[in-house]
Image (cartoon, rainbow, N blue to C red):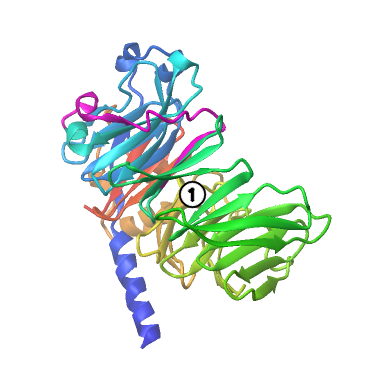
Amino acid sequence: SHQGNLGFVKRASSERFKRMNVRQMFNTYDARDSERWKLSFLRKRSKVVEIVGAQGMIFALAHSGVCAAFSRETNKRLCYLNTKDDEVVRSLFYNKNNNTLITVSVYANDNFSSLKCRSTPLEFIRRGKPQEGGMPLFQEESLQWPGFVEFDDVNGKVLTYNAKEHIYKVFDLKNYNLLYKISDETVGEIKVSPGILLLIHEYEDKDHVPLKILNVENGQVLKEFKFKLLPDRLVDFVEQFDEKLLVKQEKENLRIADVCTGACIEVANTQFMNPSAFIFLYENHLFLTFRDRQVEVWNFKGELVTSFEDHLLWHPNCNTNNIYITQEQDLIVSYCKPKQEGPEKTVASINVSSILTGKCHAKLGQNQEEEEESEGSSNRDCPLSPGGTKMTMESALGDVTALYYNEERNEIYTGTLSGRVFVFSSS
């Protein structure tokens, strides 16, 4: 039965996380290495802002711009991904199409004014020699602010924006070949969705917003239309998912329009509050909203599908670096607060919840340590940090600033305010 299947899924995922405990710690900061950095702020300890795991390695980016790679085979640092002493890494992207890590950086030599991309094969990182195998990407592009580069895993594309010349370009993520350009000064924003690009044109006429839908593969225009706006109301957001267009104006209902049929559904603004972030769940044709630490799941009929029973986010401003959604889009892993307020920090936990039911499948935290002690499998064999101190749940769950779930290895990585990365594993 369907209920039986859900029960089995819950048991299976609970089992997957049940024996997880802190097994290892890495440090993005090393005082002995501070001389290698030309810039003083790279020599300071800073919080971890992004973690990526791939092929038995962990890549951790600190807010300062230092990016370190660690091996899970040897549990040692392999290298830094900063190949120059004035390089400040801003973001990471693992390109599984060609087994490379892409770093997006700025440099002191041009006053940190433009983004530079570099692709490094994982094998060279594993050998500790990223400078030998990496290659620069998009060298012809001027990516000065507010220009950007966006990597789109779903469509296998890269979108760049040259703000100076007002040109968008779309590249193939497999080989970085240029596919097409969009040169139109009236384009104010581009949204990427499976199979399509939504072009939102700037508009002076406040009665409607001009929109264009393009085939993401070749840039051909699939549909061009104007969406009618309500007068004297600011536009909160315009989002596109397949044939559904979501438009929300200030203090007005959410409108979900079908761009093929013209049919439109309204969701009362008392039900659908303006979220701080969206995540579209392409596999399930649903979308997640984040607002005031709360997560909700909606469908495109404007119905609330899931409210979570125990998934109050610790950070009010959610981003994809401090939550993780599994490849099958069935589980969400987040750094959470308890439902009832308790003493600060001692009650933080990592909660694993079902996206479809809202049930909490597993919880890594203080209570878990107590349960394990009562079962006789306490943290007695907990490894020591390089400094010789015992690594506890408390240290791994205090001030978490980044989180990543490695599905391949069934490990959770947390990055902290102090620049450390902790590994939760069941073995």
Q: In front: 184, or 124?
A: 184
Disc 1 marks which residue? Answer: 348
- Which sits in the foreground, 94 or 332? 94
Q: Is residue 395 above or below residue 368?
A: above
Say which residue appears at 44% left-offset and 64% top-offset.
Answer: 282
The amino acid marked with disc number 1 is Ala
Residue drawn at point x = 36 percent, y = 88 percent: 1
In the rendered structure, the answer to whether residue 159 lies left or right of residue 59 reads right
Residue 82 or residue 372, whichever sits in front: 82
Question: In the picture, residue 375 is in which quadrant?
Answer: bottom left
SS at mark 1 in the image: loop
Corner quadrant of residue 48: top left
The answer to whether 345 is drawn above or below residue 307 in the figure is above
Q: Position of residue 151 (x, y in %)?
A: 41, 45
Q: Is residue 63 visible?
A: yes
The quarter of the displayed image where residue 116 is located: top left
Query: Where in the figure is residue 197, as x and y percent of width and height?
Result: 50, 55
Res 273 seen here: no
Left or right position of 148 against 228: left
The stretch in magenta equals 127-151
Question: 104 and 367: which one is in front?
Answer: 104
Q: Judge whether 191 appears above or below 48 on screen.
A: below
Please rate how many residues cluster around mark 1, counting C-alpha atoms within 10 Å: few if below 14, some from 14 to 19, many from 20: many
Residue at the far right: name it.
232
**Horizontal and vertical percent position of residue 392:** 35, 42
Residue at the (45%, 42%) spot, across then down: 169
Q: Residue furthest bottom?
A: 1
Q: How many marks?
A: 1
How far across and how far down the image is residue 35, in percent?
A: 33, 11
